[in-house]
Amino acid sequence: MQTKLTSGSTKFSVNIMYFARALRRAGLPIGTDRLIDAFGAVEIAGLRSKDDVYWALHGLFVSRPEQRLIFDQCFHIFWRRPEFLEELLALNLAVPSTSSDLGPTAPGSHRLGEAMAIARIGEEALVQNSVDQNYGASYRETLAKRDFDKMSASEIADAKRVIKTLALPVAQRPTRRFTVDQRGTLVDARASVRASLRSGGEMMQVLFRRRRWRSPPLVVICDVSGSMSRYSRLLLHFVHVLANHRDQVYAFVFGTRLTNITRYLRHRDPDVALDNALDAVDDWSGGTRIGACLRRFNHDWSRRVLGRGAVTLLITDGLDRDAGVRLEIEMERLHKSCRRLIWLNPLLRYAGFEAKALGVRAMLPHVDDFCPAHDLGSIAALADVLSTNCATFGRS
């Protein structure tokens, strides 16, 4: 490695540019301004050791705690084999591929592997392909109607990015409490008398109050059994977006047992959040016991999370291994405990769907809304349903 960065050492500058592109593909918001500053920062820090370059680029490219993992792995992969890097640069390749000798990867690092394992095509072809796929109107329409179960790996990645941009309902409802507001319509006698005491009671300013508003809690109970695993993964991405944009979002998953994953979804990085949740769930892609899991939820969690007019999302195909044992009783109790119960079923994508399964017939009478959940269009419609339900609750 050189000891001084001069105007003639353009190869190292090109390497920094390719390194920034790899981080951008992995999800870090690195623009041209940060890249220009990186050239100056490396020149000031010098190239005496790898640590100098590491912290010079770290200070510019990393702006959030969850980005440290991606930056650290990308840096060590990118600069680990300089001779391999020179070969790739000679072939006009953007980034090197990952190596199998780097040991096991941490949660969320597969996104880095996808960013650095790009096929060996020219940069111009890569940009053209990105424009054709990610920004074309026809591609977006096709992607919105593509079934999650039929999506390729690249389409799933695009779907995750679209889910992040969906408009989220934040409708509020009135509470029993009031707050001081001079534009309110109710006179706040207590606050008015308290304010007059400051002037000895000689003058009284009439104060007004209004009712407080807040968003109702949202409870998500998602089926992660074998028949739902492909759908539940992307639907949990939507739940992660909800959890990071509104308060009081509680998430549970179930297969043969119920697991609370609320704390895992609080992580800002969706890949890290879902990987941590996956590690905590022992029955992912297993069997389904809807009745037993709902009984566990009603007994242990309903009083904790279903207060204050909560809206509940139940995501399942209704195919129960126990053939609906106690399912109708637990569904009735769940329905009476929450304000609105919305059932999302991927099987509704079929035009000839009929409630023939015992589980579906036991659950259907106790839901307020029965909606599909198999593509991006259905998720966008779900956002409208949530907004309508929350607004309806606020007017009641």
Image (spheres, rainbow, N blue to C red):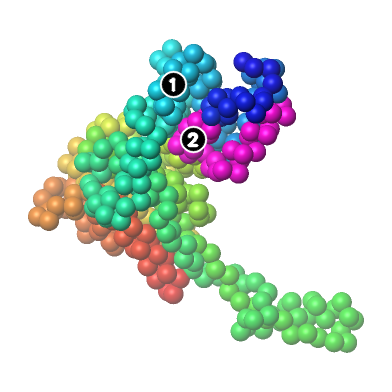
Whether residue 73 sits left or right of residue 382 in the image: it is right
Q: Is residue 107 above or below residue 293?
A: above
Q: Is residue 28 magenta?
A: yes
Q: Position of residue 182 (x, y in %)?
A: 68, 80
Which numbered marker is on residue 90?
A: 1
**Region rendered in magenta:** 17-45
Mark nearer the viewer, 2 or 1: 1
Q: Is residue 6 magenta?
A: no
Locate the C terminus and report the quarter of the image it occupies. bottom left
* Near-viewer residue (376 or 134): 134
Identified at 53% across, 27% down, the residue is 15
Q: What amino acid type should be assigned to the residue bearing mark 2?
A: Arg
Locate the N terminus and report the quarter of the image it occupies. top right
Q: Position of residue 341 (x, y in %)?
A: 33, 58
The residue carrying mark 2 is 21
> Quick check: can you spot residue 94?
yes
Identified at 38% across, 50% down, the residue is 163
Crowd rating for badge 1 (residues with CA inside 10 Å; few <14, some 14–19, many 20+): few
Q: What amino acid type should be assigned to the residue bearing mark 1?
A: Ala
Name which quarter of the figure residue 223 lies in: top left
Q: Is residue 286 above or below residue 144?
A: above
SS under mark 2? helix
